[in-house]
Amino acid sequence: MILGVYPQTKIFEKFLYLEKINKHMRVYILSAVRTAIGKFGGYFKDINPPELGGIVIQEALKRSGIPSSSVDLVIMGNVLRAGHGQDLARQALLKANLPVTVDGYCIDMVCSSGMMSIINGGQMIKSGDAEVVVVGGMESMSRAAFSISADARWGVKSALHKEFKLTDTMLYDGLTDPANYKLMGQEADMIAKERDVKREELDNVAFESHMRAYKATASGNFKSEVVPVTTSNGEVYQDEGIRKDTSLEKLSKLRPAFGENGLHTAGNSSQISDGASALVLAGESAITKFGVEPIAELKGISWIGTEGWRFPEAPVYAIKKLLSKIGKTVNDIDYFENNEAFAVASVLVHKLLGIPYERLNLFGGAIALGHPIGASGARIVTTLINVLTKNNAEKGIASLCHGTGGATAIYIEKVRGLK
């Protein structure tokens, strides 16, 4: 080795490598859509998750301007997959008429599944392993399976002293903490009491959620993000769970849902729901190749774990971590979307981070719209882009908590916005 030559050669090679992958370093969102959100046993009760997923994947690609043959991968969030067959993301992409050569996989991070699909897809592009990735989430809580114990597989010589109970997989896999078998609503009550949150505060969040969602619907603000779904009862394009006639008085009369002295009710907790959302992500090379214009840029990500029962508080720490990474403060961000799994989640980001309610969940949240758990992470990012567009704003953060204790957060900047 000749001193002075070899190191320079290596540095030059490294420079060429970095220059090569630099084309993939920025991640853009080309399109973002969602279905309307159906109530439990409502609009979509007969539609399996891959069908809902296929609808949004197909529409997201159509709006992106990218040919389906150029998709490298499909990543979809989904939690309640029991009984729906192998690899639901792959099923969904085939229903969307993507080429058989396109592969896909599902993510189960409970409520953060849809958002982690965006994070995963973005990292695929940043690494240079993909140019175009379709991401999102799909969930049919109405069609969640019932199961029996695996002991039944091996036969029962005698039923004496044995019981085989049906387990509701929606409740067990989606809404129960496996560490202590408490319902997530019970844990939401626990953190609300520890943080001295009052019932009135929770009901105020719920009331505002419904009023904002109703106003956004009535004014047509959701039209640019919702793709209609054809059902046996006709075309569905409006969220089913919004209660325009609710009031603080009505909410205050509801009984606690998770314990005699609890704070959360059916009125200030998110709705069990069905729905799907999809976004198309692309790197700079794909933008140039296809001559398409992004609607937003993905500019920051974070995730964090907490004690399981503290899950509603986790977005506070995920947002703090994200703000630190991107070098910004709450005041630098125009609008926030934080999933309303339970009303206490909104109260906590307001109180502990100082996020004004006027800049939080501007078009309502999961209390009014619904919470199809595997899809919500993608849905709130889609809605955030819409909020930024309608309000001529640029910077936004989306966040949500997830079961077992944790949260994810994403920072985006609007480019063109939704049309």
Image (spheres, rainbow, N blue to C red):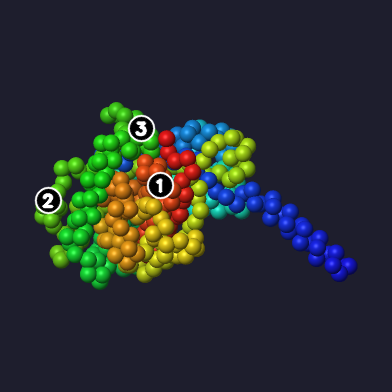
Residue named by callout 3: 228
Label 2 is placed on what type of residue? Lys
- For marks 3 and 2, give the CA distance: 32 Å
Asked if one can make out residue 281 in the rendered structure from this viewpoint, the answer is yes
Q: Nearer the viewer, residue 92 or 269?
A: 269
Q: Residues within 10 Å of mark 3 (few under 14, many from 20)?
A: some
Q: Residues within 10 Å of mark 1 (few under 14, many from 20)?
A: some
> Which disc is residue 250 wearing?
2
Label 1 is placed on what type of residue? Ala
Label 3 is placed on what type of residue? Pro
Q: Is residue 24 left or right of residue 230?
A: right
Asked if one can make out residue 117 in the rendered structure from this viewpoint, the answer is no
Which residue shows up at 39% across the image and 68% down it?
Answer: 306
**Percent of width and height locating residue 66:** 55, 35
- For marks 3 and 1, give the CA distance: 27 Å
- For marks 1 and 2, give the CA distance: 35 Å
